[in-house]
Every structure is written in structure tokens, then in C-alpha cells.
Image: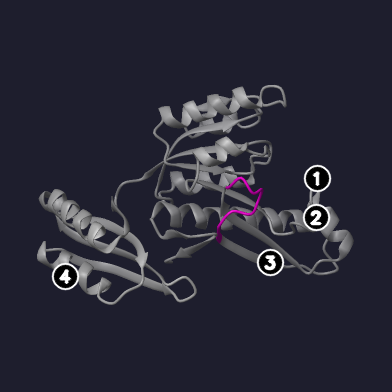
């Protein structure tokens, strides 16, 4: 029986990489279904994503051959089963537009993730979680209990085997240790008014300044607040006739769509880290 796999790799750019990868797959009877590559001339790094199908019994041999290839070419390399859904935990506070959208897309089979739990510092969405039959974990956070709360969150993430954590408008700043623990596997969403309109009611601040574009940014979480590698962004037009409430509605729709695309691409192994940036093979 044929099984589809996704191979991602990065290394120093040099002649012969594509030939070496495609030749290895050919030798093991694999058929390439999709392939994309990028060489970053500014860093001289090469990135590649290949989806291929081969006999399920050949997986171990292909994996061993790829490890030899990675050693020979000094590659960072990963192999994934295409059908496997990424175990995921969603974290949320009191704004529900993103988590509503993610849960609906997940239940509709539109996201390649396996949502194993919802974590919140408030109780607002426990009924929503129950309606999707997803475990809900209420972990309150105060300045005095932040370290303890994050320890419980990390314990839960490990227990559920979560390989992705989605901050779906989770309005708590993660500590540096937690950011390091989730490096490369936590995605955040926020409006793109930063750093101009910080704090509460950013869309009201934007309305007061007469902005003409509303945007959203999905990025990986790092210790540098809201400055992690960007995965996806989008904008929507605004005009003078729109009220702050209109701007808020448009902004929330944009945030939901941008976050969903970022989660989808991460789950499909289309996002490769390139220093402070990303390569996204859409």
C-alpha cells in the first residue's frame, strides 16, 4: 500500500541537492507528488519541501537513507506522514472569534490538526469546548501564580503530546522560559497596529487616527514580545464611514483567517524557520 510522506530540509546552498534528494527517493521506488524549493541568496541557505508516496514497508529504509543524506550534506531534515494530524492545544482568554473559527474548521476537516484540549485563564468558553467534545482546562493566572500556572500548562501540553500550541487571543504574556520551551511550535495572532496602538481597544485608537488599513499577523512565539518569525499577514481596507465597531468586526475576521492559514500551513509542514524569518511553501 502506498503512503504519502512529507520531507522538509534546510542546509547551506550548494549544487546537487535536488538531484541527491530526488535520486534517493527514486532509488526507493518513491513517486514525488509535490515539490518546492528556495535558496536564500542573502544567507546562502537552501530550503526544500517534498511530498512523495512510497510503499509503507519502505519507510524505515527511506528514513535511514535520509539520515545518511542529512549527515553527508549537513542538513536539518524531518520526515512526516502526510495523513498524520498535528496534536494541538489551543489557549484562549475572553475573545472568542479565533477559537470559534479554528474549532469549526477543525471539525469540518479543514485543518490538519488534532485538537486535544483548550486551556484558558477564564471560564468563558467551557461550554463551547464541550459542544465540540474537547477537554477544557481552566488555569487562572495572576502575577503571584504565573510561574505555577505556566508549569501546569507545560505539564498538560506534554501529557497530551501536543506538538503545536495556538494562542487564539490568549491575553497573557508568556515568560521567557515558557517561550523557550515552546520554541518553533507556538503560534500567536494579533492585530497589525503594533507598535502604534498598544493596550486596550486598539481598533478604537485606530478609528481615532483615521486608519485606512486593518491588518493581522500570525507569528511564532519568542521571548521578544510579538516579534517572532512571521508566518502570515493580511489586510482589509477601512474608510471614514466605518465606526470603531465596524473596524473591530473587520479586524476580528481578518485575525481569524490569518491564524487559520498559519495553523494549516504549520500542520502541513509548509513553514520552515529561516533565522528571524520564515519560508512558507504555500
Query: Disc 4 marks which residue?
Result: 23
Image position, residue 61 (x, y; %): 12, 52
C-alpha span from label 2 to label 4: 52 Å
State yes or no: discs 1 and 4 in contact (Cβ < 8 Å): no
- Which of the 4 quarters of the picture holds residue 19? bottom left
Vertically, is 121 above or below 252? above
Please say whether residue 264 is visible from this viewpoint. yes
Query: Disc 2 marks which residue?
Result: 197
Image position, residue 98 (x, y; %): 60, 47
Colour scheme of the picture: one colour
Q: Residues within 10 Å of mark 1 (few under 14, many from 20)?
A: few
Horizontal side of residue 8 vs 173, given as left or right = left
C-alpha span from label 3 to label 2: 17 Å
**Quadrant into which the C terminus falls:** bottom left
Q: Secondary structure at mark 4?
A: helix
Query: Disc 1 marks which residue?
Result: 200
- Residue 236 inside the magenta-drawn segment: no
Q: Secondary structure at mark 1?
A: loop
- Camera-nearest label, 2 or 4: 4
- Which of the 4 quarters of the picture holds residue 39? bottom left
Q: Which residues are magenta?
A: 222-231
Which residue occupies 46% across, 32% down? Answer: 157
Amino acid at each position: 500500500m502506498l503512503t504519502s510522506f512529507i520531507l522538509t530540509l534546510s542546509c547551506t546552498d550548494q549544487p546537487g541537492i535536488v538531484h541527491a534528494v530526488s535520486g534517493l527517493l527514486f532509488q526507493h521506488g518513491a513517486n514525488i507528488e509535490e515539490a518546492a524549493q528556495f535558496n536564500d541568496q542573502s544567507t546562502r541557505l537552501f530550503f526544500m519541501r517534498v511530498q512523495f508516496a512510497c510503499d509503507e514497508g519502505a519507510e524505515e529504509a527511506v528514513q535511514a537513507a535520509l539520515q545518511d543524506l542529512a549527515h553527508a550534506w549537513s542538513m536539518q531534515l524531518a520526515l512526516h506522514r502526510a495523513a498524520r494530524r498535528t496534536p494541538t492545544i489551543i489557549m484562549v482568554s475572553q475573545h472568542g472569534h479565533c477559537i470559534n473559527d479554528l474549532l469549526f474548521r477543525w471539525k469540518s476537516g479543514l485543518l490538519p490538526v488534532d485538537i486535544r484540549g483548550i486551556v484558558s485563564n477564564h471560564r468563558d468558553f467551557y461550554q463551547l469546548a464541550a459542544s465540540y467534545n474537547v477537554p477544557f482546562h481552566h488555569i487562572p493566572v495572576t502575577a503571584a501564580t504565573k510561574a505555577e500556572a505556566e508549569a501546569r500548562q507545560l505539564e498538560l501540553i506534554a501529557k497530551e503530546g501536543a506538538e503545536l500550541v495556538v494562542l487564539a487571543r490568549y491575553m497573557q504574556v508568556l515568560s521567557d522560559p515558557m517561550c523557550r520551551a515552546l520554541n518553533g511550535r507556538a503560534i500567536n495572532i494579533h492585530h497589525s497596529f503594533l507598535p502604534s496602538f498598544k493596550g486596550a481597544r486598539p481598533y478604537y485608537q485606530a478609528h481615532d487616527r483615521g486608519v485606512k488599513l486593518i491588518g493581522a499577523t500570525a507569528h511564532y512565539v519568542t521571548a521578544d514580545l510579538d516579534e517572532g518569525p512571521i508566518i502570515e499577514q493580511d489586510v482589509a481596507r477601512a474608510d471614514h464611514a466605518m465606526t470603531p465597531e465596524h473596524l473591530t468586526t473587520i479586524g476580528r475576521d481578518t485575525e481569524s483567517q490569518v491564524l487559520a492559514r498559519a495553523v494549516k500551513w504549520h500542520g502541513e509542514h509548509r513553514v520552515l524557520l529561516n533565522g528571524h524569518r520564515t519560508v512558507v511553501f504555500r
